Image (tube, rainbow, N blue to C red):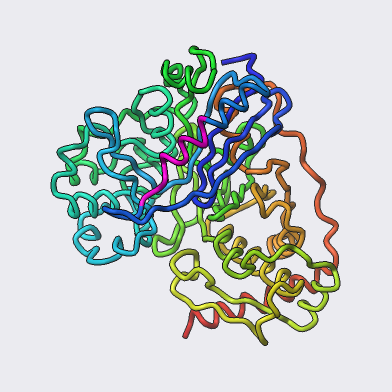
Amino acid sequence: MTGLKNVAVIDIGKTNVKLVMVDLQTMAEICVITRPNKVLPGPPWPHFDVDGHWTFLLSGLKNFHQRFGVEAISITTHAACVVLLDYQGQLAAPILDYEHDELDVDADEYNAMRPPFSETGSPRLAGGLNIGAQLHWQFKKDSKLLSRVKSIVTYPQYWAHRLTGVAAVDVTSIGCHTDLWNPTAGKFSTLVNRLGIGSKMAEVRRPDDVLGPILPEIAVRTGLPANTQVVCGIHDSNASLLPHIISKSAPFSVVSTGTWVIAMAIGGAKTQLDSKGENFINVNAFGDPVPSSRFMGGREFELIQRGAQPCADESDMQAVLEENIMLFPAVETSSGPYKGREMNWEPSEPEFASGTREVCLSFYLALMTAKCLQNIGSKGSIVIEGPFARNYFYRLMLEAVTGERILSSASATGTSIGAAMLLQRYPAQMFDRQPQKENTPMLDVLKAYATRWKSHVECENKV
């Protein structure tokens, strides 16, 4: 589709649900509205408040169309989410929250049946972060569920289905540590038949495939034209990655930040991914494998800051460096390169809501990011997408420890521009808002701090 200007992007993150108005001609977000991504307790299990989201999204689409004129709709969502549709096109069961505690209980049967890392590029992750584990658990929990299911779709396509009535799966969502995809062969893994769902998986489509116009009832409720087109949709980290794949030459890496911090290397050094860590093979919008690694950095930021507003300045950074105040992994113990460890502060925990606490946390997040980048063979410039792109102290430490040029995306959400670009397969205007390399003060001091932090962490590895 060409000649479009105003694209509405549905952006479902694990923490927040967003509707974003994107001007494709300027590659700018001109309006963003949000609501919390509330998890409902059940029965039958903790699940997402999709009806609340739907009301919010339809109201937002109506408002956006009145203000700007919505010409098309794109969708991006977090991964590790699968939707079971019944024969009437409704939910066969509530959409399971992948963080549900029971998913880790008695998982031996699933672990025995899941394919090896060499087939899927997908490590065994906590809870339901492997979609295969979710499905296995749900089918055991409800023995009649599988018979009620007509179609299995991934999360962006659930919203596309509600808009168009067309069931689909996109390659980036099914290829993101689901255990259900073979990224090298570009087809479903052997687990699909082991779970007995081969005939129920919706068709795998490109993220930029147009699934169709909106349903007549959607046009009535929102005021959008009946011919408003909806694209298939894309996994959020791959939405962040897409503009850079199109506009940059390898090697480079993209760090998508939000609840999850996900590092993705394009054209990096050949490296053997460690299947025991949070390293995995992503699949980009063109179906190509992408070495990736991640940790729950946004969640960790929230746990430490507890809502405290940014207040740090250069003097706080100076104090952290002079006194060697450090935060060691892991704040969120179930994920990341150091999962299973308990966090600790040295020499002592900074006061809550202090500038030193904020700087120390920012340094910790940068050092965790650097470890993820190292694990995937990152080379070349590093683009930061999402909220961490605005964190000055995070950027300084990441540049010091990697020695690479750090570029901060101008995007407020880190995903919506890429999702909107699905509506232009060959965009005429690429990203050109690339700031210059940081003028990093105290480079040697920052490097020394990073060396001490890494030495401490590695010593703990050997214990």
Image location (x, y in percent) of residue 433 = 77, 37
Q: Depth check: 242 or 343 in front?
A: 343
Residue that appears at 31% across and 45% down:
94
Residue that appears at 22% across and 57% down:
110
326 left or right, relative to 194: right
Residue that appears at 67% across and 49% down:
384
Q: Is residue 16 above or below residue 8?
A: below
Quarter residue 394 falls in: bottom right
Q: Depth check: 226 or 247 in front?
A: 226
Residue 116 in view here: no
Look at the image and give the residue range highlighted in magenta. Answer: 47-58
Q: Is residue 295 above or below residue 458?
A: above
Quarter residue 85 falls in: top left
Image location (x, y in percent) of residue 339 = 46, 70
334 left or right, relative to 325: left
325 left or right, relative to 121: right
Residue 54 counted in the magenta span: yes
Label tally: 0
Q: Quadrant of the N terminus?
A: top right
20 left or right, relative to 338: right
Residue 131 in view here: yes
Quarter residue 157 falls in: top left
Image location (x, y in percent) of residue 416 = 60, 36
Residue 11 counted in the magenta span: no
Residue that appears at 53% across and 25% down:
73
Q: Main secondary structure of the magenta part?
A: helix
Image location (x, y in percent) of residue 264 = 55, 49
Q: Is residue 143 above or below residue 148?
A: below
Q: Depth check: 102 or 388 in front?
A: 102
